[in-house]
Image: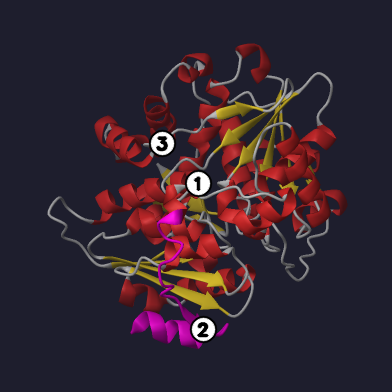
Amino acid sequence: MKLYSIKDHAETVSFAQAVKQGLGKNQGLFFPSEINPIDDIDALLEMNLVDRSRVILQSLIGDEFSEQELHDIVATAFNFPAPVIKINDKISALELFHGPTLAFKDFGGRFMAQCLLRLSFDKKGNGDKITILTATSGDTGAAVAHAFYGMDNIDVVVMYPKGKISFLQEQMFCTLGGNIRTIAIDGDFDACQALMKRSFDDEELRQAIGLNSANSINISRLMAQICYYFEAFAQLPKAQRAQTVVSVPSGNFGNLTAGLLAKTLGLPVKRFIAATNINDTVPRYLASGEWDPKATQATLSNAMDVSVPSNWPRIEELARVKGWDLSELASDFVSDEDTKQAVAALDEQGYLCEPHGAIAYDCLTAQLSEDEFGLFLCTAHPAKFKESVEEILGRDIGLPQELADCADKPNLSIDMANDFAALRAFLMA
């Protein structure tokens, strides 16, 4: 498989290089040179998750892994379900939080970890040491930390905005220790993301510590996410598929990028809705044509508190390649007050949801036509936002074992100013 940098099409790499390198020069995102539709989508949707995902990923990656190698990678990474739950006759929810860290990021994080392990080290574990640097607005940190935890020759450093993610989100990745180091940055997620990108521009630093990223800017994570869109449609009645609208809670826009790639491969999604909170750079851009990021505001849906989404250039590149008019992409933003009402409305229908999924639901109900069916993505377990959900609903929602196990452990993070020199010194040490 060949990929090129969106910033410099002359910079081309293999899938293996893209996974190990993370970003191209000048922070360029890698993008597939070819995206060919898959034959016989109906037959593909009859397969189980692992077999189907192997076919999808093989169509993108090519022969860089054998069929057996890719099957083994997928079977190890995707060893949990992604069920579609009926809310009412018109709308269903795709639950993506049944992995080990209770969030959709488990799909991408675990797939990338398995790929990197095979691409960087031989069967005896020999190979150059790697440092994974990632920024998280909530759930990426846990997924990446758990995916790489305990791996020899791989260090993980996770940055997150201090005081701006939920307590239980923080506990899931800041209590591990070992090869996982965590930094609470005095700033918002965009500041963390800027520090990470600046690190990749420092060639001396990259070479010295074997720098790589596990954010959705890494193409392997993005490709893994394509697979659960196919898994969702496999669970829908055939008669509904072509009339199904998918609403995606959007922060850094990797999730929506994966959905649009799934559609490019032939998945019969009628249309997508990009649902954001009041950090609404993209909805405003689609309405006005002006890219005008504002200061990031803290909300109930903290994982979507992003004003400069890193994956948006990939969406624009896909639109350019396919000749799509991005103004036709539906979008909207939802206030915290409306988010609370959406959580309550779902609860009245017997479905427990958290703020991110509730935003996708709210946008879906507002834009769904009479002849359409709706699917919204639930990206995290409600208990990861226990305090806010309980305040909205006025009752205890309990804790799953995965969260109960880490709730009382000591937080091992260090605090750091929004200062690249301080981060560089920490990484080099």
Q: Amino acid at mark 3?
A: Phe
Separation of residues labelled 2 and 1 (CA atoms): 29 Å
Which of disc 1 and disc 2 is earlier in sequence?
1
Residue 139 relative to residue 387: left or right: left
Relative height, residue 418 to residue 161 (above, below)? below
Q: Residue at x 26, y 56 (%)?
A: 120
Q: Is residue 85 visible?
A: yes
x and y, in percent, of residue 265 in the image: 55, 29
Q: Residues within 10 Å of mark 3 (few under 14, many from 20)?
A: some
Residue 106 relative to residue 313: left or right: left
Q: How many marks?
A: 3
Q: Amino acid at mark 1?
A: Leu
Separation of residues labelled 3 and 2 (CA atoms): 36 Å
Residue 362 falls in image quadrant: top right
Separation of residues labelled 1 and 3 (CA atoms): 18 Å
Which of disc 2 and disc 3 is earlier in sequence?
3
Residue designated by label 1: 222
Secondary structure of residue under mark 3: loop
The colour mode here is secondary structure
For the record, the magenta segment spans 404-429
Q: Residue at x 60, y 55 (%)?
A: 386
Residue designated by label 2: 416
**Front-most of residues 322 and 156:** 156
Secondary structure of residue under mark 2: strand
Relative height, residue 220 to residue 171 (above, below)? above
**Front-most of residues 384 and 357:** 384
Q: Are marks 2 and 1 in contact (CB under 8 Å)?
A: no
Q: Are marks 3 and 2 in contact (CB under 8 Å)?
A: no
**Front-most of residues 122 and 18:** 122
Q: Residue at x 72, y 48 (%)?
A: 393
Residue designated by label 3: 80
x and y, in percent, of residue 392 in the image: 74, 52
